[in-house]
Amino acid sequence: MASQNDKKAEKRPNIFVRMGRKLKETFSELKRVTWPTFPKVVKGTCVVLVVVVIFTVVITAINYGLQELLQVITNIKGIE
């Protein structure tokens, strides 16, 4: 059994060699990436900001409505 473990250790390069290979692969892939143009980035950012604002308004309205409903149910305001 000891000889099988020795063979496995010999076949596999050490951690630094494997990390170096992975870094080389990563950088070679990054060179092939098609990066978006600046106008596309600005347009995408604007879309995200608009969606965030819309969701903020909707969630705030729902929160306010539920808060008012809770006050009516529990008679916190009192009947006038």
Image (tube, rainbow, N blue to C red):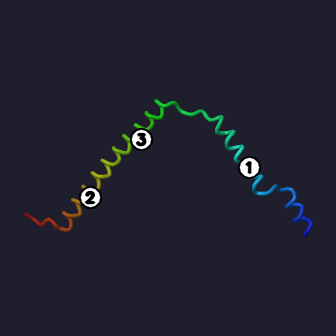
- Picture disc at residue 48: 3
Viewer-nearest of discs 1 and 2:
1
Q: In the drawing, does residue 16 fall left or right of residue 29?
A: right
Q: Secondary structure at mark 2?
A: helix
Chain-order first, disc 1 or disc 3 = 1
Give the quarter of the image for residue 12: bottom right
Helix, strand or loop under label 3:
helix
What's under tag 2, amino acid-wise?
Leu
Earlier-in-chain disc, 1 versus 2: 1
Quadrant location of residue 35?
A: top right
Residue furthest left in the image: 80
Q: Write the residue at 33% across / 49% down.
A: 56
Q: Is residue 67 left or right of residue 18?
A: left
Q: Amino acid at mark 3?
A: Val
Q: Position of residue 61 (x, y in %)?
A: 27, 51
Looking at the rendered image, the quarter that the C terminus falls into is bottom left
Q: Which residue is tagged 1?
A: 20
Looking at the picture, how far across and down is residue 14, in whole percent? 79, 57
Mark 2, other Cα within 10 Å: few <14 / some 14–19 / many ≥20: few
Question: Image point 86% across, 56% down: which residue?
Answer: 11
Residue shown at the point (48%, 31%) measured from the top left: 38
Q: CA distance from mark 1 to mark 3?
A: 37 Å
* Residue contact at pointers 1 and 2, CB within 8 angstroms: no
User: Is 55 or 31 nearer to us in this picture?
Assistant: 31
| Secondary structure found at label 1 | helix
Q: CA distance from mark 3 to mark 2?
A: 27 Å
| Distance between the alpha carbons at the discs numbered 1 and 2 | 56 Å
The residue pinned by badge 2 equals: 66
Compare marks 3 and 2 and give the one earlier in the sequence. Answer: 3
Residue 64, image x and y in percent? 25, 55
